[in-house]
Image (cartoon, rainbow, N blue to C red):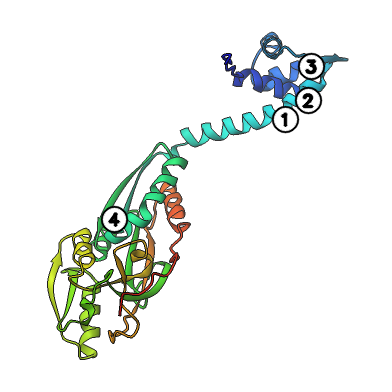
Amino acid sequence: MPCQTIRNLDIATLRSFVTVAELGGVTRAAERLNLTQSAVSMQLKRLETILDQQLVERAGRGVCLTREGEQLLGYGRRILTLNDEAWQRMTHHAFEGRVSFGVPEDLVDPFVSPVMRDFAADFPRARVSLTSSITRKLVDQFNDGRLDVMLTTEPLDTGTGECLYRGPLEWYVGRGSLIWKKRPLPLAAKADCIFLPMMRDALERAGIAWESPYEANHWRDLEAFVSAGLAVETNMALVVERSRDRVPVPANSGLPPLPDFGIFLYIRDGASDLALQFAGIVRDTSFTPQTRQPPAVQ
């Protein structure tokens, strides 16, 4: 297969051509571009030589485009628009710097990766400092000014940020497990998790005995207990729905309903333009549950 040489159009030469076409003459184009007339004329000639096409022809004291020149003009304008947009985006001071972002541990895997990918594509000169922790600790850091943007999981009636998602907490168990029938009901939770007192209060009001034999320091460890069928947990559907190993406890299990929770977005007062752009990408993330998982076996 014959080798095809890739040729590149010079942006400066193309800009001279487009300016000449729009202003109707070399003299006015040279003034606009702060170049000499001879420099602009040489650039036009170089472009015609590269393309092996006549692009302009004399028309009185000015110039007009040939048919080939008219065709190139459309391409030239689009190329220059993209060039100028890329240059502004890559060099503007508002798109440099660092954004500090706090997010609950259980939201990192399903939601943070696409946010980071989109932000890096739009603002390649920016940097992100990611903090993953429980909501209570994130709130402390946010209040201390250490976070620019923060997501939280909070009860719907107490969250004060912009609510991106709302839904009830639900009971979950390992696929194929009947541990939800055991009494005392074994719970898996982090000791400092905001969900744990919700579970305990709901169970005590329902008169259901419980115990906490499995506690974890990290969310991943907690998931291991539940996926192994050793305990039940609570969470929001949009977080657990992506798991293959955890499913909802049957609706007729007798376990009590749990309160509504929300995912809230907070932006620090006086945050930079870059942080506001980052928050916009977070806001555009879909927090809608995808497909409903079938319940655990009964």
Amino acid type assigned to the residue bearing label 3 in the image = Val
Question: Marks 4 and 1, Cα distance to the nearest angstrom?
Answer: 49 Å
Q: Position of residue 278 (x, y in %)?
A: 42, 50
Answer above or below: position of 197 versus 208.
Answer: above
Q: Are marks 1 and 2 in contact (CB under 8 Å)?
A: yes
Secondary structure beneath disc 2? helix
Question: Marks 2 and 4, Cα distance to the nearest angstrom?
Answer: 56 Å
Instruction: Say which of marks 2 and 4 sits in front.
Output: 2
Visible in this render: residue 143? no
- Residue appearing at x 45%, y 41% in the figure: 121
Amino acid type assigned to the residue bearing label 4 in the image = Gly
Secondary structure beneath disc 1? helix
Question: Which residue in the structure is indicated by mark 4?
Answer: 145
Question: Which residue in the structure is indicated by mark 2?
Answer: 70
Q: Nearer the viewer, residue 101 or 189?
A: 189
Q: Position of residue 117 (x, y in %)?
A: 41, 45
User: Could you classify mark 4 by the number of other residues whose Cα lies within 10 Å: few (under 14), some (14-19), or many (20 or more)?
Assistant: few
Among numbered discs 3 and 4, the one appearing first in the sequence: 3
Question: Which residue in the structure is indicated by mark 3?
Answer: 56
